[in-house]
Image (tube, helix red, strand yellow):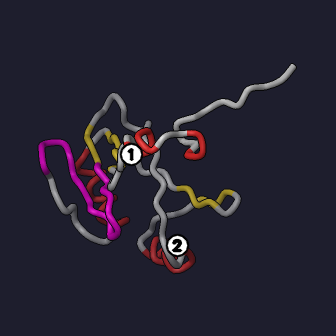
Amino acid sequence: MTSAAVSRPWDFNETTQWERDSFMAIVNALAGIMVSELTTAEAWYELLLSRPADARPMEGLAEWKLADGGWIQVFQDKERAGSSSVTLLVSGLDDQLAELKAKGISIETYHDIRLREDRHGN
């Protein structure tokens, strides 16, 4: 029995120029974090990020712009609170961990990955 090669849209060796040009060019991303109570969550993220929210575009939403693009959006959504997952990339991890510890934010270490839940279980 022989197996046939399967063409996948992300395999550029197997796609046409038109198919490659039709891919969505994503230039930014937003991390949506659902919380049960925005006022408390906003204070925690202000502490984490060392600054107040950059925008509050509508009721129940606070946003922080990230240095190289992207945004953290904290939404009040009691039904979905605790179901968010966000990965934050930082430089100088040991320095960042020391700064968080000084702020009273504890970090759990798991196989060189540092995990932290906010008060809403995210």
Q: Viewed as shown, does residue 12 lie left or right of 20?
A: right
Q: Viewed as shown, does residue 55 lie left or right of 102?
A: left
Question: Quick one: quadrant of the N terminus?
Answer: top right
| Residue 70 rendering spot, x and y as whole percentages | 32, 58
What residue is at 79 percent from the left and 25 percent from the top?
Answer: 3
Rendered image: mark on residue 97 = 2
Q: Classify mark 1: helix, strand or loop.
A: helix
Rendered image: mark on residue 118 = none
In this rendered view, identify the residue nearer to me: 103 or 20. Answer: 20
Q: Viewed as shown, does residue 30 lie left or right of 3?
A: left
What residue is at 54 percent from the left and 41 percent from the top?
Answer: 10
What residue is at 42 percent from the left and 51 percent from the top?
Answer: 118
Toward the left, the furthest residue is 58
Q: Classify mark 2: helix, strand or loop.
A: helix
Query: What amino acid is labelled 2 in the image?
Result: Leu
Label 1 sits on residue? 21
Please give the count of numbered marks on the rendered protein: 2
For label 1, the crowd category at 10 Å Cα-Cα, with few meaning under 14, some 14 to 19 and many 20 or more, is: few
Question: Quick one: quadrant of the C terminus?
Answer: top left
| Residue 87 rendering spot, x and y as whole percentages | 48, 54
Queried whether the magenta region covers residue 71, the answer comes back as yes
**Residue 45 in view, yes or no:** yes
Q: Earlier in the sequence, mark 2 or mark 1?
A: 1
- Write the start and end of the magenta stretch as one range: 57-73
Q: In terms of image quadrants, where is residue 94?
A: bottom right
